[in-house]
Amino acid sequence: LLLIACVVVHLYACIFWRVKLSYSTEEERQAFLADKNVEPESLAGTYMVCFYFVWTVLATVGFGDIYATNTKEAIFCVFLFITGATVFAFLVAQINEIISKVQADTKELEDYLDAYLSVRPRLDTGTLLSIRAFERYSFQEDQ
């Protein structure tokens, strides 16, 4: 999931810089980079500023230190907001699915252990706990 998020952020960071290159003047770009303490020739520094901006938007943090400075960048940001909401919803759904699966497996294991141990003759607590631990291990290995 994190890899998917990083790929999305990378793509949007590159698109953000492309929009900035296409729709702002050289002086505006120089001022933008100077404001962020990045040398104009530093590709890595420029990339990190764009990467940072996209992460803050997608994470809904939005510190306000980097923002759209023209209409084209604002339009790009709207698409970025929509993508951020979509990616966030996707990640929440995936996490929810993982939690539901773990809970279902746990419930299945507990039902199995209850049924298994109910047909056994009455044993002392230590033996029951040992059986339960072994069966829990065996169940997890089978999954």
Image (spheres, helix red, strand yellow):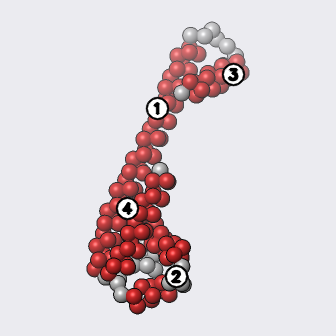
Q: Is residue 106 visible?
A: yes
Per the rendering, the mark at residue 41 is: 2
Q: Label 3 neighbourhood size at 10 Å, few (<14), some (14-19), many (20+)?
A: few
Q: Mark 4 points at which residue?
A: 84
Q: Label 2 neighbourhood size at 10 Å, few (<14), some (14-19), many (20+)?
A: few
Marks 4/2: CA distance? 30 Å
Residues at badges 3 and 4 in contact (C-beta under 8 Å)? no
Residue 125 is left or right of residue 21, and the answer is: right
Disc 3 versus disc 1: nearer the observer: 1
Q: Name the residue under label 3.
A: 130
Q: Residue at left 66%, top 22%? A: 134
Q: Name the residue under label 1.
A: 104
Per the rendering, the mark at residue 36 is: none
Query: Residue 116: image x %, image y %?
Result: 56, 15
Amino acid carrying label 3: it is: Ser
Quadrant housing the C terminus? top right
Q: Earlier in the sequence, mark 2 or mark 3?
A: 2
Q: Residue at left 52%, top 31%? A: 106
Vertical placement of 31 versus 136: above or below?
A: below
Q: Earlier in the sequence, mark 4 or mark 2?
A: 2
Q: What element carries label 2?
A: loop
